[in-house]
């Protein structure tokens, strides 16, 4: 009797301690996350919105499987604990056609559903697919450098460093390359990422649906200053954007080959800057730098593109 | 003239390469100091001969297995120290620079490489060596000398990867060293070469070991043990070793091409001159994804043995388990592209690889249900191995869900290279491979030592691990949603990530405390070994390894058993047959050989010489390897006899106990 009491007391103590620890951990996690910006879930773009929905649907589906698994795991473990001699003991029970068919079948159904979702969403959210809209898109060429981002607006003849301004509710067509090790171009609040690779051009399409400033970064390590490869995206009203573009065109800083070559050298924490582009072929030249058979990538000069 | 000779002999090594910043110098001095202390102790206690005779030259898989485990534990401590440094830097948030960017990048590159190649792989091969021969009723592996070569190549790679603490620098290009960052243009130093050659040498060791155990399983099973009567751990090892045989040659070739790019200025993976970094990324993952299953399949096998034994019940759905293992083995080669959905492949390609990835969840799910139902109508004893099993199912299921979420390409664009991804693969590899290793270690420990590990300390370690694990990785999942990418040495404080990084850092410290308790557990258990004596069959085992003496004799089986059923030992315990007096025969075992260790040493010198461009030394050491091999392979006298009388004497002693 006395022993039993002691055991119960110990068990209660264990439950108390583990509950206190759990509450403490949850409290701390709540404290360090409350009010923080969560761009993958707090989205502001057409593509990111759909990606968020997709993520939530997949997790919801997943929990349909995970929760029963946990109930079974702890339920069966508790019921058939060695101390519970009342439970049935059947050491030879080793297979059951029906049960096994059930758990080959349930995951199969789950995966079929998920596969259909995957097929549809992968095509719908293909980053290469232009966004359908009545509004004319804005083209932006992206060049990853060591360690900053250069953005070229070919139609507006502007170039910016480490920030872009974009009009809201307007499709933005990015073409992306690198004049550096591989990077990944990511603005989580607006759309998922795509790699930036030298000698190649990748594409990303997105559209902001509210005004605001969003964070962008490189998601792939590209050397010493990789952590500095952060940029701001200012989504604004169309009128504001037009005003900015007009004003930027009046800038006296010109982006030509010489300026480009200087900018492309390794640097940390590059400040934001705006240029007028005087070389309309700059983006192609950056790609072609890696195309020649003479290994000109080892030099830092650009050669005329064909 | 002198400069020319100096360059010929020392390559690009200069005295300046020995200069390091305080943290690295401290680690380097610590490592070298520990080595010197060990050497002094060996000399003082006159143990050099013992070390050479019983360990270094041994071809006994039981000895080689223990050496693998020792190396892995030391490397686990190194990897853990790296993790602590990384999290300290990130918790400081850039306001205080604990490490500079280059050093930070070297540390995370080393952390990942060491944890996969020298901790997880080492543990798997250690367990293979200890368990596979015994579980299939064999005395040895198929190629005992090759086994020793494999281990010493592994050890050579381990020394090379730690050498940058003393001389030179390590790679700062991440654990898979994507070009062009890892190419000559962006990484001209010795760092990436250290990475290449330590992996190349250890990787060849792994390939040889994989072949060895595959052949062992196929050819050396006890009579009567048909494929469908093999213990499930053997099935998992068969899957794992077949993957090694197919995947590791890809790694060898890929590293070889990267080395040629760097040594000879070739252009396999450069951005210019027709090279393609995308080719490297495809190749490295064609090895890298199967590698994950090479590690986790044996863990599945261990959990299958553990849950059946401690439930006192047959493993549920043996056939399903085998089919599931085979399916996972095959499918693991069809999903590599999911590591780079973001590289710009078309929607059709991404869809295919996304779906193939999800399909792996089916056999894995089946395994989870079978494990749970092995407990159903059993008598479950919650010893430490069972706690690891429970922890494994919980973490693995949640991590698997995160994995399934990432297998949907459009969702992956938001997870790729974020801390969400980092949290996911740590959940799988720590929760799968490491927890499996801990369960297996506790489970088989008494078999090889004759005493139990202290349960109380083991349970404390488990709870510290679980709590530390959640604290270390749940914040990373959340940080992923906040847009935090991996490998950041600093970040803008206004992002508000610091709190979560601090929590994650505390989590790593709790894990470190858990590891501390595990080490304490081993020490205390050794001290109290008289009190914790375990018999030959301490847990009520089911498979053949529990039928041998504890600790097993050098020859393991006096008479090779004949198998009639699955779980043969369990079945034979039920039948009360009267014992027929066994007839002993002479047993031939492989003789010790120093050639394996010499090849390892020469391979290490070859690696170091190549890294530092010391051409003559590289040629000499390579020729040395060939000569050693020729000498060894032309030696006929490689076996030693244990006479029937000796065996009988030994076995008589055993039955008397």
Image (spheres, coloured by chain):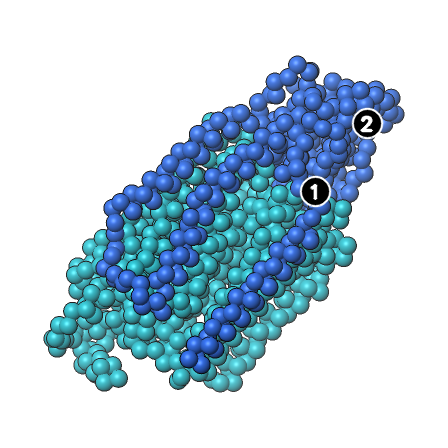
Pointer 2: what residue?
A: A275
Chain B rendering hue:
cyan
Residue A159 in sight: yes
* Residue at the extreme front: A1
Q: In the image, is residue B72 above or below residue A167?
A: below
- For the point 45% across and 47% down, the residue is A66
Q: Residue A154: x, y in percent?
A: 73, 20
Pointer 1: what residue?
A: A37
In the picture, one chain is blue; tell me its letter.
A
Q: CA distance from mark 2 to mark 1?
A: 31 Å
* Local secondary structure at mark 2: strand
* Local secondary structure at mark 1: loop
Between marks 2 and 1 in the image, the one whose residue lies nearer the viewer: 1
Q: Earlier in the sequence, mark 2 or mark 1?
A: 1
Residue B55, quarter of picture? bottom left
Q: Residue B597: x, y in percent?
A: 42, 66
Chain hosting mark 1 = A
- For the point 61% across and 47% down, the residue is B478
Locate residue A19 relative to residue B483 in the image: left or right.
left
Locate residue B407 relative to residue B420 in the image: left or right.
left
- For the point 81% across and 32% down, the residue is A273
Q: Are marks 2 and 1 on the same chain?
A: yes
């Amino acid at each position: 009797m006395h022993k039993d009491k002691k055991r119960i007391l110990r068990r209660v103590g264990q439950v108390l301690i583990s509950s206190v620890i759990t509450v403490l951990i949850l409290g701390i996690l709540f404290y360090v996350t409350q009010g923080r910006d969560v761009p993958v879930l707090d989205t502001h773009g057409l593509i990111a919105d759909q990606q968020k929905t997709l993520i939530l649907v997949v997790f919801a589906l997943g929990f349909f499987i995970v929760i029963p698994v946990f109930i079974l795991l702890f339920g069966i473990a508790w019921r058939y604990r060695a101390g519970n001699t009342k439970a049935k003991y059947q050491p030879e029970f080793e297979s059951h056609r029906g049960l096994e068919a059930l758990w080959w079948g349930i995951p199969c159904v789950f995966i079929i559903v998920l596969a259909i979702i995957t097929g549809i969403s992968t095509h719908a959210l293909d980053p290469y697919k232009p966004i359908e809209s009545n509004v004319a898109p804005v083209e932006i060429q992206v060049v990853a450098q060591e360690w900053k981002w250069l953005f070229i607006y070919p139609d507006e003849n502007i170039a910016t460093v480490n920030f872009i301004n974009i009009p809201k509710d307007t499709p933005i067509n990015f073409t992306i390359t690198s004049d550096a090790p591989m990077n990944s171009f990511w603005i989580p609040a607006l759309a998922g990422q795509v790699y930036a690779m030298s000698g190649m051009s990748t594409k990303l399409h997105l559209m902001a649906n509210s005004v605001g400033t969003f964070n962008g970064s490189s998601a792939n390590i590209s050397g010493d200053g990789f952590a500095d490869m952060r940029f701001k995206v200012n989504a604004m009203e169309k009128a504001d954007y037009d005003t900015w573009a007009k004003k930027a065109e009046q800038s006296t800083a010109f982006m030509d080959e010489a300026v480009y070559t200087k900018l492309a050298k390794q640097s940390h924490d590059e400040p934001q800057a705006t240029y007028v582009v005087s070389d309309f072929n700059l983006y192609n030249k950056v790609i072609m730098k890696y195309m020649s058979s003479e290994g000109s990538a080892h030099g830092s000069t650009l050669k005329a593109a064909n | 003239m002198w400069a020319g000779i100096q360059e010929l002999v020392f390559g690009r090594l200069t005295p300046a390469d020995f200069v390091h910043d305080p943290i690295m110098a401290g680690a380097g001095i610590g490592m070298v100091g520990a080595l010197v202390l060990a050497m002094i102790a060996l000399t003082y206690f006159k143990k050099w001969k013992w070390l050479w005779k019983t360990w270094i030259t041994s071809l006994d898989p039981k000895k080689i297995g223990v050496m693998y485990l020792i190396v892995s534990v030391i490397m686990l401590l190194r990897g853990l120290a790296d993790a602590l440094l990384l999290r300290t830097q990130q918790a400081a948030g850039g306001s205080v620079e604990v490490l500079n960017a280059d050093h930070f990048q070297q540390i995370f590159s080393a952390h990942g490489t060491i944890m996969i190649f020298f901790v997880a792989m080492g543990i798997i091969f250690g367990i293979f060596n200890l368990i596979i021969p015994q579980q299939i009723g064999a005395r040895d592996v198929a190629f005992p000398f090759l086994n020793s070569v494999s281990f010493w190549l592994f050890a050579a790679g381990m020394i090379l990867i730690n050498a940058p603490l003393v001389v030179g620098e390590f790679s700062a290009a991440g654990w898979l060293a994507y070009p062009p960052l890892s190419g000559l243009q962006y990484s001209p130093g010795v760092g990436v070469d250290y990475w290449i050659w330590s992996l190349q040498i250890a990787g060849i060791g792994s390939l040889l070991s994989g072949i060895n155990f595959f052949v062992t399983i196929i050819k050396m099973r006890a009579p009567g043990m048909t494929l469908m009567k093999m213990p499930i751990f053997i099935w998992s090892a068969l899957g794992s070793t077949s993957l090694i045989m197919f995947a590791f040659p890809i790694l060898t070739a890929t590293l070889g091409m990267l080395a040629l790019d760097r040594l000879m200025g070739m252009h396999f993976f450069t951005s210019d001159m027709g090279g393609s970094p995308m080719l490297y990324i495809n190749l490295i993952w064609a090895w890298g994804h199967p590698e994950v299953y090479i590690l986790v399949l044996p863990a599945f096998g261990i959990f299958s043995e553990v849950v059946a034994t401690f439930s006192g019940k047959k493993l549920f759905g043996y056939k399903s388990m085998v089919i599931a293992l085979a399916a996972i083995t095959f499918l693991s080669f069809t999903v590599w592209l999911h590591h780079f959905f973001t590289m710009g492949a078309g929607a059709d390609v991404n869809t295919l690889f996304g779906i193939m990835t999800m399909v792996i969840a089916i056999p894995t799910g089946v395994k989870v249900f079978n494990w749970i139902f092995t407990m159903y109508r059993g008598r479950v004893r919650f010893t430490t191995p069972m706690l690891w099993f429970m922890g494994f199912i919980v973490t693995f299921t949640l991590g698997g869900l995160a994995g399934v979420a990432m297998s949907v390409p459009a969702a992956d664009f938001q997870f790729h290279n974020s801390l969400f991804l980092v949290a996911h693969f740590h959940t799988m590899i720590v929760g799968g491979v490491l927890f499996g290793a801990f369960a297996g270690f506790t489970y088989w420990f008494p078999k090889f030592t004759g005493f139990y590990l202290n349960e109380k300390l083991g349970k404390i370690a488990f709870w510290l691990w679980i709590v530390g694990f959640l604290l270390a990785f749940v914040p990373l999942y959340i940080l992923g949603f906040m847009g935090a990418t991996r490998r950041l040495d600093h970040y803008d404080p206004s992002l508000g990530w610091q709190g979560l990084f601090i929590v994650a850092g505390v989590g790593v410290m709790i894990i470190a405390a858990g590891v501390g308790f595990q080490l304490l557990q081993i020490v205390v258990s050794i001290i109290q070994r008289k009190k914790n004596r375990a018999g030959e069959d301490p847990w009520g085992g089911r498979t053949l390894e529990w039928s041998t003496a504890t600790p097993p004799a050098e020859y393991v089986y006096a008479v090779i058993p004949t198998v009639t059923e699955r779980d043969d030992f369990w079945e034979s315990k039920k039948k009360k047959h009267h014992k027929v007096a066994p007839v002993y025969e002479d047993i031939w075992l492989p003789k010790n050989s120093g050639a394996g260790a010499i090849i390892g040493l020469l391979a290490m010198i070859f690696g170091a010489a190549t890294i530092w461009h010391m051409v003559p030394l590289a040629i000499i050491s390579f020729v040395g390897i060939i000569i050693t091999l020729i000498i060894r392979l032309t030696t006929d006298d490689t076996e030693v006899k244990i006479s029937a009388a000796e065996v009988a004497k030994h076995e008589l002693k055993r039955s008397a106990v």
